Amino acid sequence: MTQAELLRFLAETLERLGVEYMIGGSHAAMYHGEPRLTRDIDVVVALDLVQLPALIERFPPAEFYLDADAARDAVRIRSQFNIIHPGSGLKIDVYVNPDTPYDRARLARRQKLPLAPGVEAYFARPEDIILYKLLYAQEGGDLHRRDIVGIIRVSGPELDESYVAGWAGRLGVKALWERIRQQAG
């Protein structure tokens, strides 16, 4: 299975199950920014315990590793669990959307974009990718900063900078946003 095939399978599965989702992380950063290598897929989901068994069923043990107990715990406490495709070494990081004003807002802002011919998927908007990458960049990591710069360079004219600045202030990353924005030119 290729990364593109896994991403398509994931999006189609979530659509069929009626799970609200958005592709985030490096795939969304590349969609709105500059390409780079990645071995995982990040997806944010509004998943509940009622929907979880159907999701687990779509990733059978003969093909995937998915710890059902870890997934149930992640749904309960709104954290993260993994789905691994051992045959390819690919991994899906499933983030259960936290119940915060910002996290609710970013999921509501998701946008459906072309994924493959005849297939669309929900992606995080570039502003929200920037904001989450700012949160991670605070902890260190040049990769997050590079992704932000790439998004600014590619999607800059279309970015809602007032949205980014407003949430950056509320999330405590405004100074970092200003530094990276200046770096991007």
Image (cartoon, rainbow, N blue to C red):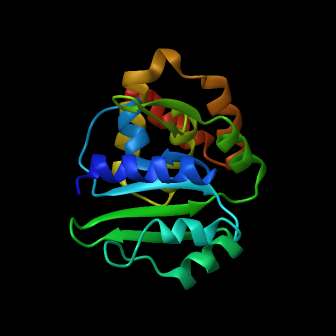
Q: Report the residue at 48% width, 46% height from top.
A: 23
The x, y position of residue 75, in whole percent, is: 65, 71
The reply to whether residue 135 is visible in this rendering is no
Q: Residue at x 44, y 53 (%)?
A: 10
Quadrant of the rendered structure where residue 175 is?
Answer: top right
User: Which residue is painted at 25% across and 43% down in the image?
Assistant: 36
* Residue under the image location 45 percent in, 28 percent down: 182
Seen from the viewer's position, the closer of residues 20 and 144 is 20
Q: Nearer the viewer, residue 180 or 42?
A: 42
Residue 69, above or below 42: below
The image quadrant where one finds the N terminus is: bottom left
Q: Residue 53's spot in the image, x, y percent?
A: 60, 72
Q: Seen from this angle, which residue lies furthest bottom?
A: 69
Query: In this image, 26 relative to 76: left or right?
Result: left
Judged left or right of residue 85, residue 127 is: right
In the image, is 132 to the left or to the right of 141?
right
- Nearer to us in this view, 147 or 20: 20
